Amino acid sequence: MMLLKVNNRIGAFLSFIIIGGHCVAEVKSAQFNADEVGSEIEKTLKCYNNPGLGVSIVKDGKVIFSRGFGVRNIETKEPVDENTIFGIASVSKSFAATLLIKLLYETTNLTVDSKVQELLGEKFKMMDEFRTKETTFADLMGHRMAIPSNNRIRFDSNLTRESLLERLPLLPSNDQFRVKFTYNNLFFGLVTYLAEYIGGGEAWESLLSKHLLQPLGMDRTVLATTADLYNLPNLATGYLEYKDNLYPVHPEFSKKWGLLAGSGAVMTSARDITKWMNFHLQEGKGDGGKTVMAAEHLEEVHKPRMLSSITRSVELRKPQFPVIASQDVYAQGLRRGYYRGYERLSHGGSTLGYKALMSLIPELQIGIFTALSGVDSDYKYRSSLHYFLLDSAMGYEQPWLNATTICSFPEPWRRKSPPSKHVKLDATLKPSLNLTHFEGTYYNEAYGYLHVNYNTSLSTLILTYGWGRWQLFYKPQSAASTHKFYGKGMDITALNLYPMYFYQGSHNGEDTIISLNATAFESKLPPIFTKAGLKNEPSGAPRRSDFAIFLLLLALVSTNLAITF
């Protein structure tokens, strides 16, 4: 593709794009028609099973679009407006990174490239001496630690922001430090704790409010950990989807899951986050041009730190798409890439019930925000909607996407991925061993304890880990000594587990279950829980590393299977 452009931000300009051997003229205009944009968005919402949507656009320091679409609750039918609050999940990382960097530069003599041990001393330890001594704040915020996510450890009721420090050195790595990008929410939990440590023990929620939210006037932004989500006015209910039916996510899930607040506890509205976008676009200034954070300090948030997965935005790097986009570098709480040749800062967020995406084009002073209730697999809706909104804000009279192609995306340019297959869960299927052999307490040094008990009324096993509870369904397979189960979330848990492997061995001359290999907790390096009461590993059991590899192969076979309940 060849792009020739005459750039004039005051008036209209003409750009020519060569696509597939044909010359296509695209006229850019300074006009932005909010009603036409709103009408197109309204049409797209009907194509996806998302009850509510909040959208906002800023340009040149002004809010040019801020609206709500759909309903906050499918039963009450209350409409979404620009002030409706949504969970924004990992978009919270931009808040966490900005706060920590602000505190580092304003209250200490440290920088983002300082060693964490310079602040915490011997209190900070990792799995090896090199990581322990060399880890910097930038390593944590740039996902450079090369330690698998272990995200399900967040179900542990005993986990706190401070006690996370004790867990981190117990988590293994399968890649080299600062060589492999490995996205990890736990380290943004540590970022949360570090802000509290610098802040003299003051809660992260309070520090965020004092240093950023209040100065920016973000009075509609709350934290899931401290807000009264049961009575919060104008809150969009989060929803899960199964077979086109929607099920509400219990507010208590958001509160508990948000413990490591910097990784995903921020909840805000389309209107309120316009102040956050302008803060990043206007070099740390708030309304009225008042400096909230020094421009050179905010610049540290935006600096590239790590090459991330090359698969991100892969569909727009393929030549069959008319526009080129990328998103392959991680900064600190933000991703970096390009859209139509302009640098783009962005971050998405996905949690049970809510999906969000924020895009910033600093050179053009444009910011786009969308938040959804419900499901958005593979970012199909959020990404395509952002490309349309970016084009509209940039002044393209005919964006390359419209309501029809947003609904069909990535078609007609590329065939859609087939939908995930559903595994039917059948409580009548039983393993060769009596279920009583599976009951007991299991222990892993990093994760702690989990419990497995038989429930007579359900006729299935129940796995309990911290505040999470799952009904286990047996899935037959060829390995006689390995018993595979799928976990259906119960009560507030909602999140399903698949797969979980129980390993059978001999103890005191009797066949029984000796360990639980929690591939669903972490697929790359599954944590192995040993059943309590077994002092020695029975002879003939596979070595830990061999069995982890075996489980990983099994997990890869299962990755395209979705759970049915």
Image (cartoon, rainbow, N blue to C red):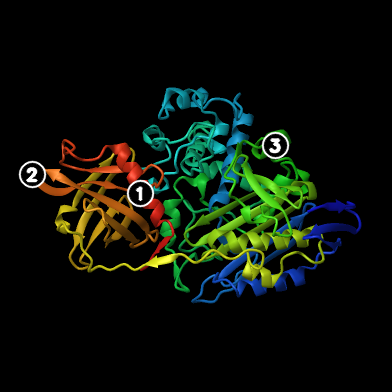
Q: Residue at left 60%, top 66%?
A: 53
Amino acid type, residue under disc 3 in the picture = Glu
Name the spot of residue 475 as percent of width and height, x first: 28, 61
Alpha carbon distance from label 2 to label 3: 65 Å
Front-lying residue, 264 or 453: 453
Query: Mark 3: which secondary structure?
Result: helix
Quadrant in which the C terminus is drawn: bottom left
Amino acid type, residue under disc 1 in the picture = Thr
Residue under label 1: 519
Query: Mark 1: which secondary structure?
Result: loop
Name the spot of residue 415 as percent of width and height, x first: 60, 65
Q: Residue at left 55%, top 59%?
A: 378
* Residue furthest front as drawn: 21
Q: Residue at left 80%, top 68%?
A: 33
Residue mark closest to the camera, 2 vs 3: 2
Alpha carbon distance from label 3 to label 1: 39 Å
Amino acid type, residue under disc 2 in the picture = Gly
Residue 527 in view in this figure? no
Neighbour tally class for label 1: few under 14, some 14-19, many 20 plus, Cα within 10 Å: many
Residue under label 2: 509
- Pointer 2 with pointer 3, Cβ within 8 A: no
Residue under label 3: 299
The correct choice, above or below, for 216 with respect to 69 in the image is above
Left of 12 or right of it: where is 260? Answer: left
Give me the disc on residue 347.
none
Alpha carbon distance from label 2 to label 1: 28 Å
Neighbour tally class for label 2: few under 14, some 14-19, many 20 plus, Cα within 10 Å: few
Q: Residue at left 40%, top 38%?
A: 164
Left of 205 or right of it: where is 450? Answer: left
Say whether disc 2 or disc 3 marks the residue closer to the N-terminus: 3
